[in-house]
Amino acid sequence: MRFSDAIHARWTDADTLLCVGLDPDPARLPESVRGRPDAILTFCREIVDATADLACAFKPQIAYFAAHRAEDQLEALIDHIHQCHPGVPVILDAKRGDIGSTAEQYALEAFERFAADALTVNPYMGRDSVEPYLAWPDKGVILLCRTSNPGGSDLQFLEADGVRVYEHVARLAVDWNRAGQLALVVGATFPDEIARVRRIVGEMPLLVPGVGAQGGDVRATVIAGRTRAGGLMINSSRAIIYAGRDEDYAAAARAAAQATRDEINRWRRA
């Protein structure tokens, strides 16, 4: 299934815009799994199984696996999601960005080695650095546009001829989106910018980090970015996966995910 079709199906059939981020920090894992050779996989797998029916997507952040030599656990985790929760797509959060020949290798890594359904990509080296990912017609390519961190304004808010850099990225994405594969990252910490991007890109999906631990406002995010179909993949990572620290961590994660999903849906229908 194409990534875009899978996301639309989750928005409508599963009635959810919640993306669950998987950022497994070994120092924050529960005692019940800490120290195991497969601790990262076990922790994430339990979180996935507890929240899959509530999620429009899962978003593992590759650094949390690679830094601990756990890429094999990332492969196993993505395979588990595909086997046990078919239809819930996996976004590999790696923010790759390099020249075309290197981008081809990054695409192979994401889509062949890890079998991700979508990948976050840094577009600031231009179209030729994005095109290799578009050679995979069933995969999603999610471009950084207006990121949730405070320092994002250092570059993304600069203006040229009255157009801010993040707005120019959004306009380029519309032009590059010939096969309907593209989405954009726009942070929940900047709802006014979400609304500006939505006006530029129409129905294009937006991956929206920044709710939960980063303090983004769910109401403002949903109202600024929703579309008739859904339009948003609202990501929460730490507030969900670290909701509990004891053996009931998966149940605590489910409760946090359900509360977030329900709050999103409240404003989705407002």
Image: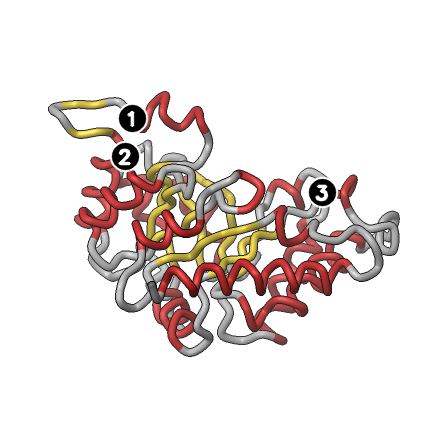
Give the numbered dot on residue 249.
Answer: none
In the depicted structure, whether residue 146 falls above or below residue 224? above
Position in image of residue 253 (x %, y %): 67, 59
Give the numbered dot on residue 157.
Answer: 1
In the depicted structure, whether residue 130 falls above or below residue 10? above
Whether residue 109 is visible here, answered yes or no, is no
| Residue hosting label 3 | 25
> Mark 1 belongs to which amino acid?
Phe
Q: Secondary structure at mark 3?
A: loop
> Mark 3 belongs to which amino acid?
Asp
> Mark 2 belongs to which amino acid?
Tyr
Could you give the CA–CA distance between mark 1 and mark 3, rounded to whole angstroms?
31 Å
Answer with the quarter of the image where residue 170 lies. Answer: top left
Q: Quadrant of the N terminus?
A: bottom left
Question: What colour scheme governs how the chains and residues are painted in the rendered image of this protein?
Answer: secondary structure
Tell me: 207 left or right of 31. left
User: Residue at (50%, 65%) from the top-left corner?
Assistant: 262
| Residue hosting label 2 | 166
Mark 1 touches mark 2? (CB < 8 Å):
yes
Tell me: 250 left or right of 130. right
Q: Quadrant of the C terminus?
A: bottom left
- Residue at the farthest left position: 161
User: Residue at (48%, 42%) from the top-left corner?
Assistant: 210
In the depicted structure, whether residue 120 falls above or below residue 51? above
